[in-house]
Image: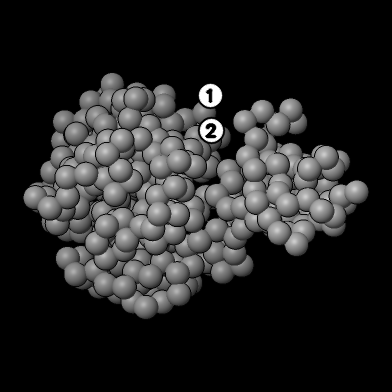
Amino acid sequence: MIKLLSPAEDAVVSQQTERQKYFRAHSKELVVAMVIDWRHLVDTGETDNTFPEPVVFTWKGEGTAVTLADNPDFQNARTIPGEKGKAQVRNLRLGTKYWWKVGDSEVRFFTTEDLPPRWIYADGITNVRDAGGWTTEDGRKIKQGLLFRGSEMDTHKTITEAGIRTLRDEIGIRTDLDIRGEAVGKITESPLGPDVQFILLPVNAGNSFETDPVHIREFFEVLADPANYPVYYHCWGGADRTGLYGYMLGAILGMKEEDLILDYEITSLSVWGCRSRDSEGCPMKLKCFAPDGRPVGERVRTFLISHGVTEETMDAIRHILLED
């Protein structure tokens, strides 16, 4: 006889560590103004705090694996291997109800905490998170499981075979959207394999973004095509150039400005050093996005239109990424 122990029936299970939660609640006080060397990003040697807390299953009995699904009929269920009455899983969706059992045991359910960002553990790389899960100004949700951001996978950080399985097989990435200028002439195929579409659209970061922006229209056109999803977009650290695109995307999707800033600052939990709303690279410090009395979504929309991104493209992205 198998007896399920944890998670308890109808529990709310967090996938954020205590440090992640504390940073989320106190980012204004924790981040400090500092100058970022945009072109010479370095690993500071800090502990990487961008990995999600695993959901841990425990039981008594002879079972060796958990069967897990997001429906009570266990359609498309996952098998989570375990031993000695314990198993764990990462990267579950936020605010989602899951049913689980071990062998022929009773069935229990739990719900994951609805607290963005949804961190993703992909072995070998850092600062990986789902762009979904945030609530917009009008109360809608950005869909999870479609758009992901993070660090590079092949140079200063190298994804492992286990990490490849996470992004390619578990999450199902179809498009590797690389925005590194330093990859031009060097990288022609995704580290996730030849079956994953590789698109290289280099972009500048920091103040140079305003004076010499490139490939902005093409980037948004890639995201306007549903056939390209799920998409993983990245620069070197998933911090600055990726942060700029994250800010623009969140703005046109309707995220609150405070959440946009928080999403930028959360990179401080990675190995790349502090990112602050007061640092020169913060998107809101750039003249093209600086507060001028208009909502942030309107400011970003004006900038994108001036660089060839059409209303139709932005509408298509909203249609793909926003829940009804």
Q: Quadrant of residue 197?
A: top left
Q: Residue at x 53, y 35 (%)?
A: 141
**N-terminal-most mark, 1 or 2:** 2
Q: Is residue 282 visible?
A: no
Q: Residue at x 87, y 50 (%)?
A: 2
- Rate crowding at label 2 as few (under 14), some (14 to 19) or many (20 or more) other CA atoms within 10 Å: some
- Which residue has dot 2 on it? 140
Measured in 3D between alpha carbons, the distance from the residue under mark 1 to the one under mark 2, in whole angstroms, is 7 Å
* Residue type pointed to by label 1: Asp
Residue 324 image label: 1
Task: Determine whether label 1 and label 2 are within 8 Å by CB.
Answer: yes
* Disc 2, SS: loop
Q: Circle 1: is it few (<14), some (14-19), or many (20+) Cα within 10 Å?
A: few
In this view, the residue farthest toward the bottom is: 45
Q: Position of residue 37 (x, y in %)?
A: 21, 70
Q: Given the current orientation, which residue lies at the most extreme right position?
A: 1
Give the residue type that dot 2 points to.
Arg
Residue 213: x %, y % from top left: 13, 46
Q: Furthest residue to the top?
A: 312
Q: Position of residue 66 (x, y in %)?
A: 71, 47
Q: Position of residue 170 (x, y in %)?
A: 49, 42
Q: How many marks?
A: 2
Look at 43% across and 31% down and name the residue there. Answer: 321
Depicted 83 relative to depicted 259: above or below: below
**Residue beneath the point at 20% across and 59% down:** 206
Quick check: 199 left or right of 172? Answer: left
The circle drawn on residue 49 is: none
Q: Say if residue 230 shows up in the picture.
A: yes
Q: In this rendering, is residue 57 above or below 225?
A: below
Q: Is residue 53 left or right of residue 129?
A: right
